[in-house]
Amino acid sequence: MVAVHHRTVSVDGFDVFYREAGAPDAPALVLLHGYPTSSHMFRHLIPALAERYHVVAPDHIGFGRSSAPSVDEFDYTFAALAAVTGRFLSTIGVERYAIYVQDYGAPIGWRLALADPAAVTGVISQNGNAYEDGFVPSFWDPIWADAAEKTTLTRDALRSALGREAVEWQYTHGVPDPTTVDPDAWEHDLALLAREGQDAVQLALFRDYASNRDLYPAVHDWLRRSGVPVLAVWGRNDEIFHADGARAFARDAHEARVELVDGGHFLLESHLDEVVATITSWLDAEGSGAVTARPVPINP
């Protein structure tokens, strides 16, 4: 049984909690979680991959067991979250790594790659968008409206996304057999969302999400020029990020592998074994280059 360590390190005066497993000198794989969860979403994936890789999964500021300062104490933008993540990786000595991104983890991962293109050696995107193709309008239109109008009315229209029904839905929609999803997963998230000030934190990030779309052309350019290996393993029934978001990677990533699984947004809760098998076979096919500390050439 692989030992998973639960650690905390100080970054910019804030505590960053992270889960870590595997040999420190093994190729590094950084797992970046989405909303409304934390590194808790990777609790089963980490030991499954740590026999061969150095796996690191931080909680973003405002999430999980990391510091959750108020909106007056921290600028809750995706740029700020990515900046802390970059300094966190530097603090623990991880310089080159592959990324596994899901939901919010995707724009954080893209910012890391754009800030240091040679650092990211491979991409696994599990329902982590990088294209306009993936946005399901019924879910995203209220978020775009709030980003554009920035009124109390448009902000308050998003408050229901913080509630029990919406959080449980994120885990169970699109899953052929919802009884395979552990209810403790969403109960864990709900307990953390209930902390004082969390509504303002999450509403600030909802409002900032539109800024991520502006990065997409640069991300596509990075994918083309770097030739970084990409695996998009996606819940095909996701009503937040449509499967077209997975297929779109093939436009820019050389020989991107796209695998659509009969699941929803939080695929690891219902299809862990299938995701692990897909990742393992992709890494075997790519060789160690997908996660090893090799520099990625960026042609001018």
Image (cartoon, rainbow, N blue to C red):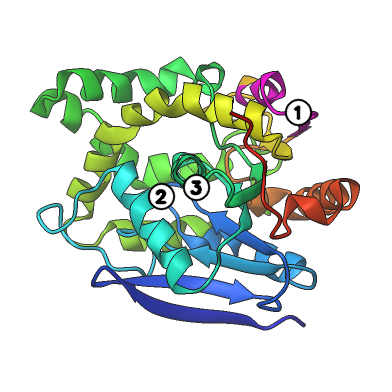
- The quarter of the picture where the N terminus appears is bottom right
Q: Which mark is residue 123?
A: none
- The quarter of the picture where the C terminus appears is top right
Disc 2: CA contacts within 10 A as few (<14), some (14-19) or many (>=20): many
Disc 3: CA contacts within 10 A as few (<14), some (14-19) or many (>=20): few
Regarding mark 2 in the picture, which secondary structure is present there? Answer: loop
Magenta stretch: give its range: 245-260
Give the amino acid at mark 1.
His
Is 217 left or right of 26, judged from the image as shown?
left
Name the residue nearer the viewer: 149 or 273.
Answer: 149
Question: Is residue 139 among what the camera can see?
Answer: yes
Q: Magenta includes 241?
A: no
Image spot of residue 297 (x, y percent): 67, 41
- Mark 2–mark 1 Cα distance, whole angstroms, equals 32 Å
Residue designated by label 3:
116
Quarter of the view holding residue 238: top right
Q: Magenta includes 251?
A: yes
